[in-house]
Amino acid sequence: MRSYDVVIVGASVSGASLAACLGKAGLAVALVDKASFPRRKACGEGLSNVALAALGRMGFEMGDVVDSGLPYYAYRIDLEGRSHEFATGRERRLRGIGMQRTLLDQALLDQASRLPAVSSICGVAVSGVREDPEGYVVSLSTGQTLRGRHLVLADGASSPCGRMLGIPVHRKANPLWGMSFILEGSFSRFAGEVVVILKEGFEVNCTPVSPSRLNVTFLAKREKVRALQDPRLRARLLAEAKEKSCFTGQAMGKPLQVGPVGTARRGYAHGSVMLVGDAAENLDPIAGMGMTHGILMAEMAAESLIPVCRDGVESGPSLARYAGRAGRMGRSYRGFTRLTASVLRSPARRVLLPALSATFLPGVIRSSLDEDSTWESHAPAFPKRILSLAGV
């Protein structure tokens, strides 16, 4: 049995970025994922400037991935032929990058795996996990066993390890489901916008992710998504997505199934286990906030774990500080995504969208996407009365 300072289960955005931070600090890290990389994953594929700034603070070199993507300056809602623009201003400042999730995952994993202190074990599932007096014992499907002084779960919204450990999960009613497509072709004009089309009970999210690719993701209630089995409906919605995005092209390969999304919350710590990314909380997929939330959690987790493992700081108070900081940050982002999502899905959206697009909501969205040095600097954009309206 090989021992590590930290075992991280899940090597996607949150897990890989946390592993790299810990490895750079000299901690021995095992990074485990059942998937083999590169792999496709259903995702809106927008990364906000807040997340890009955090990756920079963590020491990641993101130039090649950023250069492969396309910048976005605005967030546009299209409802019954009328457009409402959010997250922009007269100066049209950069708000984020549309990039292929496959490339982002691989870049973060590669940079983590190159560190001598990080052992990446991909393509291998976790078959069991238990606590013992020296930390946690993680059993793999290969028969290998790992021991970690500390355990971090970054294994997604379903979190198989969370179930093994009996970590309670709070689920929101009415989750969303859908399909995600990557279209290959060309843009006749690039407007620098992420477009959301509200049509026939669907949210059609359109994110340009390269000069030749457009991500189109359909989201709806589960019973509505069944209608997407009709190729005529899919073709009609895809045609409108291409028209609104000024794109000509065809779908690559089979669509990925999406869902449930925006439903699960386990919290950021359970006993002595840390949770990051969707394992901690699965946000509504609005404006790339899911990946932003996960990356910021990884940064906070590293700031808590490094003093514990390297300097002998007591773990209990450090874990509590992480949970408190991540919880406050999570509440702000949960408020943003739920508030925005509730407007998009409200029966009164024909009235709400024009009114809110002309008042405070653009400022709320702008503050969430801007490249502030820390999440705390834009968290005041979410006063308690607004968060309460969003049900958080």
Image: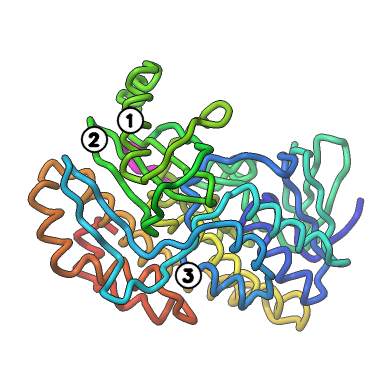
Question: Which comes before the other along the chain, label 2 or label 1?
Answer: 2
Q: Quadrant of residue 87?
A: bottom left
Q: Is residue 174 magenta?
A: yes
Mark 2, secondary structure of its residue: strand
Pointer 2 residue: 199
**In x, y percent, where is residue 180?**
47, 35
Kindly identify which numbered label has been placed on residue 49. Answer: 3
Q: Is residue 307 left or right of residue 142?
A: left
**In x, y percent, where is residue 173?**
32, 39
Dominant secondary structure, magenta: loop
Q: Which residues are magenta?
A: 169-176
Mark 1, secondary structure of its residue: helix
- The mark closer to the camera, 1 or 3, is 1
Q: Residue furthest right?
A: 1
Q: Is residue 341 magenta?
A: no
Q: Quadrant of residue 331?
A: bottom left
The residue drawn where x is 37% and y is 32% is: 238
Q: Amino acid at mark 2?
A: Lys
